[in-house]
Each structure stands twice: as structure tokens, then as C-alpha cells.
Amino acid sequence: MIREILVCLLLLTGSLLMFLAGLGLLRFSDALCRAHALAKASTCGICLLLLALWITLNDEISGLKIFLVITFSFLTIPLAGHLTALLIYRHGHKSPAPTAPAETNVSGSPHGER
Amino acid sequence: MTVYVVFFCFFLLGATAALALVRLLRGPSIVDRIIGFDLVATTVGGMIVLLSVWWRTHLFIEIMLIFSLLGFVGTVAFVSYLHNNPGKFRATRRTKNPSEPTDP
């Protein structure tokens, strides 16, 4: 019973974090903010879902493989987010917001001086 | 109780995939489309995990590993291509702002 409640809690938290990643991807204004929202929330959400699967299965071999998948997710998803953020930082400095003119946005944003 | 929670989580992950597809369709720059594709790949991995929790099987873990690997390799391929050809990235940026003068 306690295991079932723990699985439900982990599943709900992980899915809610993934949904928040999607919401941040849709609602944020800049591509850098979108990469930031995706990397953290998506990593934490997928790891919580995998922990729920680990508790559900309750098996040593499956636990080893799930641990491998968790390590792989922790390695790859922030790496992909960092690569996209590096691409935006190096090449995408001329990115005006849709509501503000280009000059005020470049002088006001912290990454606009490059 | 777990079945209803799994249904609700399927609904949440489907909404996440829909939001990422909206961003993939109307993203202003090409990096937004890459990020949306990455989130769709991660969401499909989460759906595989939910299906595996529902059916209580361990056969899908390798499939999930391979799928996340494919999503990561696709993202890295797109990003490294844009790193090597920054002209493509600037061209996609410039089409959004028509008031900016285009140099030949």
C-alpha cells in the first residue's frame, strides 16, 4: 500500500514536471529561457518517472538497467541543453523580442553585449 | 488507484507533447524547433515508462534507452551542423525581422 502511494506520488510529480517543461517551452519569451526551462524540468521529470518504475518492478536486474537509464538521462539531457544554449550565445545575439524594439532589447539584456 | 494515476499522467504527457509540437511549428528561430523536438523525444520516453508501469514489465527499458539515445544524437547532430554553418542560423533569424536591412 505504501509502495503504491509512493509510486503514484512519483508518477504525478514527474508528469507535472514534464508538463511544466512544456509550458515553459511555450510561454517563455527568449530561446535561451526556453532551453533553461527544458533542461532542468525535463531531466528531473524523467528521473522521477524512472524511480517510480524502479519501485513498481522491485527487481535487481531491472533496477540495474533503470539506474543505467537514469545515469544516461542525467548525462545527456543537460548536455543537449548546454549545447543549444552555447549555440544561441555564440551566434544568436541579434534576437529582438516581438514586443520591444531591437536597440533597447540589446542594451537591456544581460547577454546582449556580445 | 495506480491505473487512474497512470491515465492522468498519460493526459499530462500528451499535453506536454502537444505544447512542444506547437513550439516546434511556430518557433521563431531554428533553435526553438530543435528544443521542441528534444522535448517531444523526452516525452515519448516518459510515455514508454508509464506504459511499463501500467503493464508491470521490464521489457521496455532497453527501448527507452535506445529512444533517448536517438533523441540525444539527433539534437547533437542538428546543433553541431548549426555550429559549423552559422550562416544558416543567421538566415533563419533574419527572416523574422523585415525592417532590418539585408546585406548581400
Image (cartoon, rainbow, N blue to C red):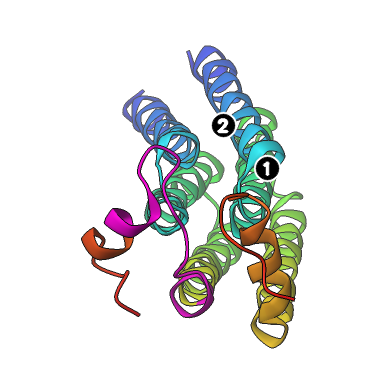
Name the foreground residue: B42 vs B103. B103
Residue closest to the far bottom:
B84
The answer to whether residue A33 is left or right of residue A46 is left
Q: Is residue A7 magenta-colored?
A: no
Residue under pointer 2 = B16
Q: Residues within 10 Å of mark 1 (few under 14, many from 20)?
A: many
Please state the chain letter of the residue tagged with numbered disc 2 in the rendered image.
Answer: B
Q: Residues within 10 Å of mark 2 (few under 14, many from 20)?
A: many
Looking at the rendered image, the disc whose residue lies closer to the viewer, 2 or 1, is: 1
Residue type beneath disc 2: Thr
* Residue A36 image-quadrant placement: bottom left
The answer to whether marks 2 and 1 sit on the same chain is yes
Residue type beneath disc 1: Leu
The residue that appears at 35% across and 80% down in the rendered structure is A114
The residue that appears at 73% across and 72% down in the rendered structure is B88
Element type at mark 2: helix
* Residue B76 image-quadrant placement: bottom right
The answer to whether residue A55 is left or right of residue B88 is left
Percent position (x, y) of residue B84? 70, 87
In the image, residue A31 sits, relative to residue A75, either above or below, namely: above
Element type at mark 1: helix
The residue that appears at 53% across and 12% down in the rendered structure is B4
Percent position (x, y) of residue A70? 50, 63
Residue under pointer 1 = B24
In magenta, the rendered stretch is A87-105
The residue that appears at 56% across and 58% down in the rendered structure is B100
In the image, residue B67 sits, relative to residue A49, either above or below, namely: below
- Report if the CB atoms under discs 2 and 1 are less than 8 Å apart: no
In the image, residue A59 sits, relative to residue A82, either above or below, namely: above
Q: Is residue A88 magenta-colored?
A: yes
The answer to whether residue B45 is left or right of residue A56 is right
Percent position (x, y) of residue B92? 69, 60
